[in-house]
Image: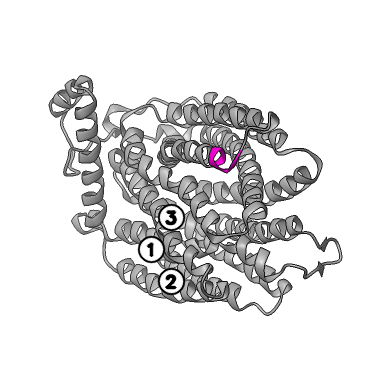
Amino acid sequence: MASDPLENGWKRRAALLLTGQAFSLLGSSVVQFAIWWWIVMQTRTGSAMLMATLFAVLPQSLVAVFGGPMADRYNRKALIVLPDLIIAGVTVALSASFATGWANLSLIFVALLIRSAGSGIQEPAVQSFIPDVVPADKLLRVNSIFGVIGSANRIAAPALAAVLVNLVPLWAILLVDVTTAVIGVGFVVMIRLPMKDASMRRAPADADGTAMSEAGMRPRAEAESAGLVAVLRRTFADLKAGMAYTMRHPHLKGVVLGDALTCFIAVAPMNLTLLLMAREYEGIDLNLGFVNLTTASDKLAANELGLSVGLLLGGALMSALGPRLLRGSLARMRAIACGIAMVGITVIGLGIAPNLLAYLVIDVLNGVASAICVGPMHTVLQSESDESMTGRVFGLDTMLCTLGEPLGMLVFAPLADVIPIAWVFISGGLLTLPVAWYVLVLAGRQPASSASA
């Protein structure tokens, strides 16, 4: 049996990718927090949060329709680098508008739209690129480390954003993202992938998800130059193929639908935590000993830090214990179901928290629950999908999940202006529990690949 060429030098490649993404995530998070806080403190309404969410999330969902198939067809490294550079250019323009006094809420929404569209291409490319960088038996560890890095960035970013908001104008904060994007691109560019032996390559999949021969690839290659209509037709055919392929595999189906439903029911209310903090805990100070939470920006930062600390702890737990405890697909699916149930319970807890300290503790636990889901979810999608379908599966997951958030906000954000916001969290958490049961049911069904083995 031929040795996997990915075994040689995979640590260096993984380190370059993870370091590059760490810088990119840090800058993006700092700017995202600063923009969201600006919107919250300027408007304090659920409708403004709804619009911000639509512009920040919906484009990513729509563009992911194209991003997934693009990750299967084109250079994945280029699809990671180019969106970062485009987003950096847009951020420079937004910074200039704030510096000259031309900026307004509409301009911020446009910037959020472009940044979100770039993520719709980049995220499926990153997730599809990871199996190109590391061996299959290292995927869970690398995904968990990726989660830890993301969580560490989310801890550093709100703290850094809170300091910068009180020291420098917003236009200067925006330039942080530009700097980190350039650094992150530099690390990713340095990655060199090994050549795979021809016998180890899998043939691309056709419209129904089955493998194609080299001869069958020629008409598709000729169609590359057929124009915009052909590109759109091929893209939607790829999306259809990815959906059909995913729905035939119980574990892929469970992860994608479980992720989408959780984003719709539980994550959408979580986007209102900033509004919950601004309304419910205004004028309430909390002295934690090492820090005294008094201002609105302090509490908003504490809200983000609590979730991020939980994500970091959960990611570290999955990185250390996951490879040993979650060796089979069944174990990973059960962990995902457990994580979704914990997300639902902690969302309820955020709504019924008796005080600010209890809220922050539950916020940390919510982060732990989310981290328990993410690592195994990505590993299942990467390890159980055919190499030629990985991008489409992740594109479908990204599209449905990111579409679920704004659709959920269309329901929950208006309610937050009509009923007590705590009820929004309680209802969202309760409705999440059946989703966990659905994933657990699918976990017991044997994947098609196993059935045929």
Q: Amino acid at mark 2?
A: Thr
Q: Amino acid at mark 3?
A: Pro
Horizontal and vertical percent position of residue 247: 24, 56
> Distance of mark 1 from mark 2, alpha carbons?
8 Å
**Point 32% across, 47% down: residue:** 393
56 over 227 or under it: above or below: below
Q: Residues within 10 Å of mark 2 (few under 14, many from 20)?
A: many
Residue occupied by mark 3:
406
Residue occupied by mark 2:
432
Q: Earlier in the sequence, mark 2 or mark 3?
A: 3
**Point 61% across, 45% down: residue:** 32
Q: Amino acid at mark 1?
A: Leu
Horizontal and vertical percent position of residue 85: 53, 26
Q: Residues within 10 Å of mark 1 (few under 14, many from 20)?
A: many
Numbered label attached to residue 157: none
CB within 8 Å, label 1 to label 2:
yes
Q: Earlier in the sequence, mark 1 or mark 2?
A: 1
Question: Of residues 254 and 62, which is closer to you in this image?
Answer: 62
- Image depth: mark 1 or mark 3 in front: 3
Region of the chain picked out in magenta, as a range? 104-108
**Point 61% across, 68% down: residue:** 365
Secondary structure of the residue carrying numbered label 1: helix
Horizontal and vertical percent position of residue 113: 47, 40
> Distance of mark 1 from mark 3, alpha carbons?
12 Å
Secondary structure of the residue carrying numbered label 3: helix
Was residue 222 drawn as part of the magenta stretch in this picture?
Answer: no
Residue occupied by mark 1:
261
448 over 202 or under it: above or below: below
Q: How many marks?
A: 3
